Image (cartoon, rainbow, N blue to C red):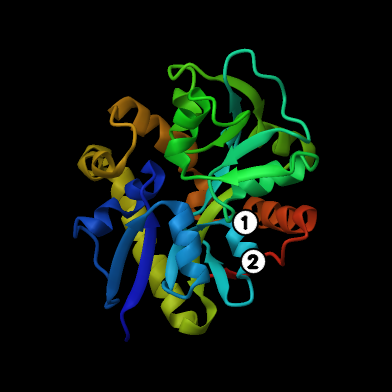
Amino acid sequence: MKTLRLGLSTCPNDTFLFGPLLEGRVDRRGLDLELHLADVEELNQALAAGSLDVSKASFATALDLSDDFGVLRVGSALGYGVGPVLLGRPGATMPGPESTVLCPGAGTTATLLMSCLYPRVLRLEQTRFDRIMPALLDGQADAGVCIHEGRFSYREQGLELLDDLGQRWENTTGTPVPLGGLLARIDIGKDVHEVLTAVLSDSLAAARADVPATLPTMRQWAQELDDDMLLKHVELYVNDSTTDLGTAGRRCLAELARRSGRGAAPVVLG
């Protein structure tokens, strides 16, 4: 079996799921895995460039790559009241056609949600997710779409909530927010998809069975080093849909594809 280039993001829900695998506490079942950690938008771009065989990715990118990549049924992040948020400085008004809004990457679901929910806002500028709040505080933009730990720490940073994009999506569609999942090349074959799913399911089960053992790996990569914040992130983003994408996951992916017109919903693998 050839080496599989596997990407995972540095956000806590992914380092939690992958922690036991990274730490050598999980049987790889014969798979030769070359692991790469990066920001999710870097992973989106690497998948599009053909540099990875399997990777965490935004579901917006999954729509664009659905001809070549499917989504594994394990490892997805669906947002139930915890999607991206639109932030501004104190006293900021809702963005309009002339506003500049910072987004965390053209391939992210956060950017796609902003485009779907605020089609009149045309000036979307892309920047790395951890640079958005500092840029807002410096007055470099009118508003910004924040993800990951920023959702929980913006008040302490001195920013205000303009809109909860995730909640707006849920209220509008009746489905959770399809944030991201683990994509795999379709052409690596059904047998490999099934083994990958088993290995990653084992890693998730091991992390849940011994959460303290996974905290050092989570701390190593997190932007927010407070353990309570890390565990809150895991509690909110690692749920039943992470174990198995299920019916809810398939429905929200189909809804994202329909509303965005960006591509077909990816097939579910494994």
For the residue carrying disc 1, how many other residues have a C-alpha within 10 Å: few (<14), some (14-19), or many (20+)? many
Q: Is residue 259 above or below residue 266?
A: above
> Hey, what amino acid is under mark 1?
Ala
Residue sitting at x 44%, y 64%: 55
Which label is found at residue 60? 1
Tally of marks = 2
Q: Position of residue 16 (x, y in %)?
A: 33, 46
Asked whether the viewer can see residue 39, the reply is yes
Element type at mark 1 = helix
| 3D distance between C-alphas at marks 1 and 2 | 7 Å
Q: Position of residue 180 (x, y in %)?
A: 54, 53
Label 1 with label 2: CB-CB less than 8 Å: yes
Q: Is residue 31 left or right of residue 187?
A: left
State which quarter of the image contains the N terminus: bottom left
Q: Which residue is mark 2?
A: 64
Q: Position of residue 197 (x, y in %)?
A: 43, 67
> Hey, what amino acid is under mark 2?
Asp
